[in-house]
Image (tube, helix red, strand yellow):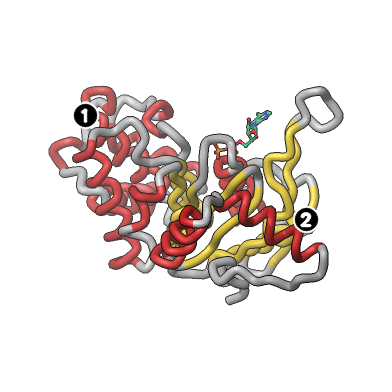
Amino acid sequence: MGIRLENVDYVYAAGTAEEKKALDDINLKINDGEFIGLVGHTGSGKSTLTQLLNGLEKATSGNIYYEEKNIYDKGFSMKELRGNVGLVFQYPEHQLFEVSVIEDVKFGPKNLGLDNLEVEMRSFEALKMVGIGDDLLDASPFALSGGQKRRVAIAGVLAMKPKILILDEPMAGLDPAGRDEILELLAKLHRENDMTILLVSHSMDDVAKYVDRMIVMNDGKIVLDGEPRKVFKYQRELEEIGLGVPQATNVIHKLNVLGAGIEQECITPKEA
Ligand code: ADP
């Protein structure tokens, strides 16, 4: 059933001189099993969106439904949401702090209140998934390479067995080989475990080859949403007539306000 956002706004520092609308009327459905690339320039609202999706921040207005249950309803368990929507932050290796790789991975599942055996099993399995061998289990996380650290941090989230995995710029700061490793890992998790993945990146080119669907954000709004080849085609056509996606979206929006009823091929209805 996935996760659905309905008319979601998010405003930072409301009522102050620094007030900033980071999300502006977001309507979006993430279906089970999709591999989505969420792309857009720095400041377009991608990180804010990820934080709303796992309940770290609350929408200023609008609603979010996890498996069709409103996460802002009183009876809804935020713990359930956080267990099911795993968020890998930017530079997640900065949060590694335990004495060994295995202890670091165990941290998340331990916090879910699982018994020791289950915690161990999940942690070993997660490390295997990310390609960290048994020889590194007792190593200090700080002794690992940049790419290895990143994979251990991802394993920490995978060990919580989330249904939806969200990664905020997981390739940032890695060399090309490290970037490919991460992308291949995500493609494998999607292929073999049918995991729903939302991959946040400022680079369309990096993610286009891997994802089934690309969502482009600009200034807090979703401006394109569709198959990567359609998104690229649309973008190229706009460039040929000298318009960027945001300007074109504004033009279409204005025309629609005037009653033109224009639909963009790529802005697909997000219903399942
Ligand atoms: P992205 O992840 O696409 O780079 P963000 O979600 O981080 O975008 O930011 C969206 C907008 O919200 C930007 O204009 C940013 O400056 C602003 N913003 C982000 N975090 C804060 C914050 N803690 N306080 C005030 N403004 C913020």
Q: Which residue is mark 1?
A: 145
Instruction: Name the amino acid, label 1.
Output: Ser
Q: Quarter of the picture for ligand 1?
A: top right
Quadrant for the C terminus in the image? bottom right
Mark 2 or 1 closer to N-term? 2
- Residue visible at 68% across and 40% down? 22
**The disc label shown at residue 181, or none:** none
Location of residue 135 (image quadrant): top left
Q: Is residue 260 above or below residue 132?
A: below
Residue 208 seen from this side: yes
Q: State the image coordinates of residue 99 (x, y, percent, origin top left).
A: 31, 25
- Residue visible at 23% across and 51% down? 128
Which residue in the rendered view is the most extreme toward the right?
A: 15
Left/right placement of residue 166 relative to residue 211 reads right
Q: State the image coordinates of residue 136 (x, y, percent, origin top left).
A: 18, 36
Q: Is residue 269 above or below residue 5?
A: below
Which residue in the rendered view is the most extreme toward the front?
A: 241
Left/right placement of residue 70 relative to residue 107 reads right
Q: Disc 2 vs disc 1: which is toward the camera?
A: 2
**The disc label shown at residue 62, or none:** 2
Instruction: Name the amino acid, label 2.
Output: Gly
Location of residue 103 (image quadrant): top left
Q: State the image coordinates of residue 208 (x, y, percent, origin top left).
A: 36, 57
Q: State the image coordinates of residue 227 (x, y, percent, origin top left).
A: 44, 67
Q: Nearer the viewer, residue 211 or 197?
A: 211
Quadrant for the N terminus in the image? bottom right
Q: Secondary structure at mark 1?
A: loop
Tell me the distance, in whole angstroms, between the alpha carbons under discs 2 and 1.
42 Å
Q: Secondary structure at mark 2?
A: strand
